[in-house]
Image (tube, grey):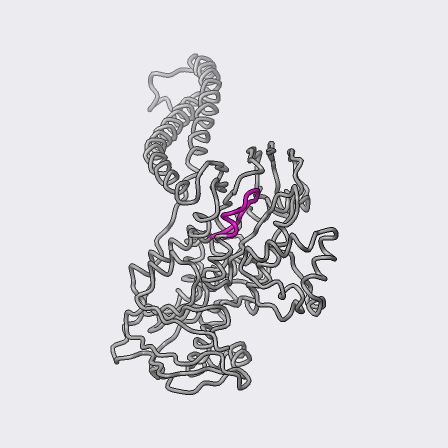
Amino acid sequence: MSVIEIRNLSFTYEGSSEPVFDGVSFIIDSNWKLGFVGRNGKGKTTLLKILLGECEYSGSLISSEVFQYFPRIIPEEKWDSTADELIEEAYPGRESWRILAEIDKLGMDAELMYRPYRTLSFGERTRIQLATLFSGDNEFLLIDEPTNHLDEETKEQIKKYLNSKKGFILVSHDRDVLDACTDHTLALNRSSIDVCKGNFSSWYENKEKRDHDEAVRNEALLREIKQLEASARKTREHADSIESKKIGFDPVKDHDRSIATRSYLGAKSKTLQSRVGSMLERQSRDIEEKKGLLKDIEKISDLKLLPKQFRAGSIVRAKDMSIAYDGRIICRGIDFEIKSGDRVLLKGRNGSGKSSIIKALLKQSRRYEDPVLKKETENLSYEGELYLAPSAVISYCSQDTSFMKGTPAEYAEQNGIDKTLLFTILRKLDLERSLFESDIREFSEGQKKKTAIAASLSQSADLYIWDEPLNYIDIYSRMQIEKLLNTYKPTMLFVEHDSCFEEKIATLTVKTETVL
C-alpha cells in the first residue's frame, strides 16, 4: 500500500485566463477503487494527463506508482495485427498467461487474442485492453469511461470485473457503474475537490445535505453582503459630501459658513477621507471574502421543452420487420408501436440492429435529405411493415458527433435552429459562454454531445429520436435531462445503456436480438 499525494497543484491551459486547478491538494491511497466525477470540462481528463506526466504544472506530485491509462488508441493502420501482437509491441514483457487469465474473468474466449484487431467488436477491444492493464504488477490504473457505447451484457461483465479489482481511478458518468465498482469518490466541485469514502450514491447524498446547509448559509451571506455594500455606499457618499463642501460656498445658501471655516473643513475632510479609505478597503475585503463562500454549490437549472401533441393515432408502427446491410440480415421480427406520450427504449446487444431501426425510420422522414444520413443508410434495406406518420415532425440526436463543425451559432444556422434558444440550453447544461466563439470540432466529446442534445431540445417535434445521447455527458446534466423528460413527457424512441436513465424514462422496452 502507498499513497499518491498532490500538493498545491495549479494548471492553466495556454491562452486561457481561467485556471483548471488553483492550489489544489489531496491524498489518495493506491489500494482504493476510486470513482472520479465532475462536470464536463472541469478537468477530469486533465488531471489524468498530469498523473501520466503529459502536462506541465506547478505544485508537486508525490508517488512511487507507475500509472497506466485506458483506453489506448490503436492507429487504424495497425488493425490487421492481432491483439496479441499489439500487446507485445505496446507492453513488452507482459506475460501472455496472465493476460489470458484476466480475459477468462471477463467472460471472453482466448481465441480472440489471435484474431485481427479490426475484426473485434468495440466491447471485445475494451475488455482485452482492461485485461492487459490488470495483468501488470505495481501499476495504478487510470480508467477513462470504459463503458461508453457498450451494451448491457458487456457492461455487466466489466462492472463485475472492476468490482473484483483495486488500485484504480475510474472516470465514469454512469451512476450504476460507479456504485458497483468504487469504494471512494474523488469529486471536482465548482471551486474545490472532495475525497471521501463511499461510492457515488453515498457521496451524492452527503453532497445534497451539504449543499442544502450551504444554501441556507449563502442566504445569510447574501444579506450580509447587501448590508456591507449599502454601508460602503453611505460611507462613500458622506465622504464625498464633506469633500465637496471644503472648496467654495454660496453665502446665501451656506449662511453659517465663512472663509475661516474652509481650513477647518479641509482638515476634517482629509481625516475623514483617510478613515473612509481604510473602512472601504476593509468592507471590500469582507464583501469579497463572503462572495468567495458562494462558489461551490452545484446549481442544476431546469430545462424546458415544447413538444408537439400528435393526435392522429400511431406515429410509428413496425410489424414483423427485418433489417439488412448489403443484403445481410442483422435483426428480424421487430414489432412495436409508438403513440403520443410513449417513450420507447430499443434494447439489445451491440450489433443487434438498434441504430439500424432508427436509421430505417429516418430514411422515411424528411430528414433523409441530410447528406450524412444518406451516406449512413445507402446500403440499408428492410422488409416487413415500417410506418411513419407523414405529417410527423422528428427531432434527431445522433450518437455520432464527428460531422459537427463551426461555432454553435453557425451550427444553429445550418440546421434551422433558434440560436438564442440553443445558447440558453447550452448555458443551462453548464457549457462555458467562452466556447460559443469556438469551433465545435475543438470541443471535448462531452461538450459536443451537449451541443447535439441542446440542438434537439431546441426543436418542437412530434417525435424525439435519440441514439445513445448520454455518452460522455456528466451526471448532473443527465439528471437535468431526466427531469426535463419526466416533466414534459415528449414522445420518444431512444437507445441508451445508462440503466438509471432507462428506468426513469422508458414507458416501453423493445428488445432486439442479434442474427447469427
- State yes or no: residue 166 in magenta: yes
450 and 99: which one is in front?
99
Q: Is residue 69 above or below residue 392?
A: above
Left or right, residue 337 beside residue 87:
left
In the picture, the quarter occupied by the N terminus is: top right
Please identify the quarter of the rendering in which residue 222 is found: top left
Please identify the quarter of the rendering in which residue 108 is found: bottom right
Does residue 14 show up? no
354 and 214: which one is in front?
354
Locate residue 450, reporting x and y percent.
Answer: 47, 59
Does residue 412 show up? yes
- State yes or no: residue 369 in magenta: no
310 and 355: which one is in front?
355
Please identify the quarter of the rendering in which residue 111 is found: bottom right
Q: Is residue 230 above or below residue 76?
A: above
Q: Is residue 9 above or below residue 318?
A: above
Q: Residue at x 55, y 47 (%)?
A: 44
In the image, which residues are magenta? Answer: 161-173
Q: Residue at x 44, y 79 (%)?
A: 362
Locate residue 162, reporting x and y percent.
Answer: 52, 50
323 and 191: which one is in front?
323
Q: Residue at x 41, y 55 (%)?
A: 478
Locate residue 346, reporting x and y percent.
Answer: 40, 70
Locate residue 270, reporting x and y percent.
Answer: 48, 17
Q: How many dots with numbers?
A: 0
Q: Residue at x 69, y 61 (%)?
A: 84
